[in-house]
Image (cartoon, grey):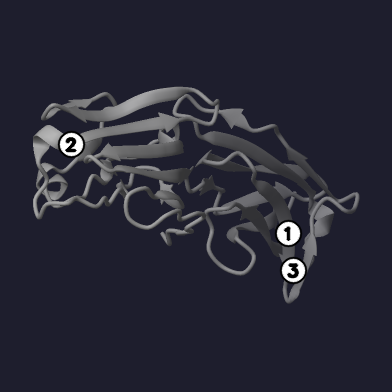
Amino acid sequence: MTIKLMVLALYCKGSLAEITRELSVLVGNEVTLSCMFDTPHKLVEWSALSIEWNMVDKHAKKSMVYTLEDGRAHVYKEGSVVNETCLRQSDASLQLHNVTVGDEGLYTCRVINPLIYTESTALKVLALPSVLLPEKATVREGQEKTIQCDVTGFYPEKVAVTWLIQNGTQTIHAGLGQLSRVCNELAVHNPDGTYSIRSGITLHSSVLRGGEIHVICQVEHQTYNGLYNRSLHQSRFTVQPL
């Protein structure tokens, strides 16, 4: 997974810095949110060090993640770690383990040592869709058959599902004629914060020429790499004589 990094602002080198970065991470992975600060000494003096990590989620709700005051650390967010060895070397970066959709938000690190340093990271969480489509389907001659494409566990919500019919070297979009109909349901919000959607295609046996076609469920989502950000899943479709 390629992580995007963008420095949006850098103000006043030395005593006071304000930096905002953007990071993207897949659900279930680990990510490190940077917070590197200056210190007048070679090693950090705990008595002079104060650190606060907070997070503002997509609903604008602010919560505390981690604090260090008077040499005592407090972790408020499960799965978050500030490495003590790194901290002694002016690195207060925050590690998030097993990232979930709920970890998405704006994270801000504030360090007083005694200089004040502030650094923020806008964390974007992504979840790759899982697509399930029958490998093959059969329709009786003169009748119709519906097959379903299940797209589950994706985030963010925006997704596009389209159907293609491949007959030999010719590929056409399904649902444009009377011999095929497409029905896309609304996305469902899952308990873990991801989304799922079902799409179905109904085909009449008359659409088959030569007794066999390939039906393609095409899924487009932000998590897919490539020029068109799409994933193709193919089903072999045949006619069963009466």
| Residue depicted at 40% across the width and 38% down the height | 107
First-in-chain label (3 vs 2):
2
Instruction: Say what secondary structure mark 1 lies in.
Output: strand
- Residue closest to the eye, 70 or 103: 70
Left or right, 148 with reference to 8: right
Disc 3 + disc 2, Cβ < 8 Å: no
Which amino acid type corresponds to the residue marked 1 in the rendered image? Leu
Question: Dot 1, how many residues are within 10 Å of its Cα: few (below 14), some (14-19), or many (20+)?
Answer: some
Which residue is denoted by mark 1 in the rendering?
A: 164
Residue 241 visible here: yes
State the CA–CA distance, disc 3 to disc 2. 69 Å
Which of labels 1 and 3 is toward the front?
A: 1
Left or right, 84 with reference to 155: left
First-in-chain label (1 vs 2):
2
- Residue closest to the eye, 79 or 41: 41
Which residue is denoted by mark 3 in the rendering?
A: 167
State the CA–CA distance, disc 1 to disc 3. 10 Å
Indicate the position of residue 110 as horizontal and vertical percent values: 33, 37
Which residue is denoted by mark 2 in the rendering?
A: 49
Indicate the position of residue 160 as horizontal and vertical percent values: 68, 48
Which amino acid type corresponds to the residue marked 2 in the rendered image? Leu
Which image quadrant: the N terminus? bottom left
Q: Is residue 151 above or below residue 5?
A: above
Left or right, 212 with reference to 225: right
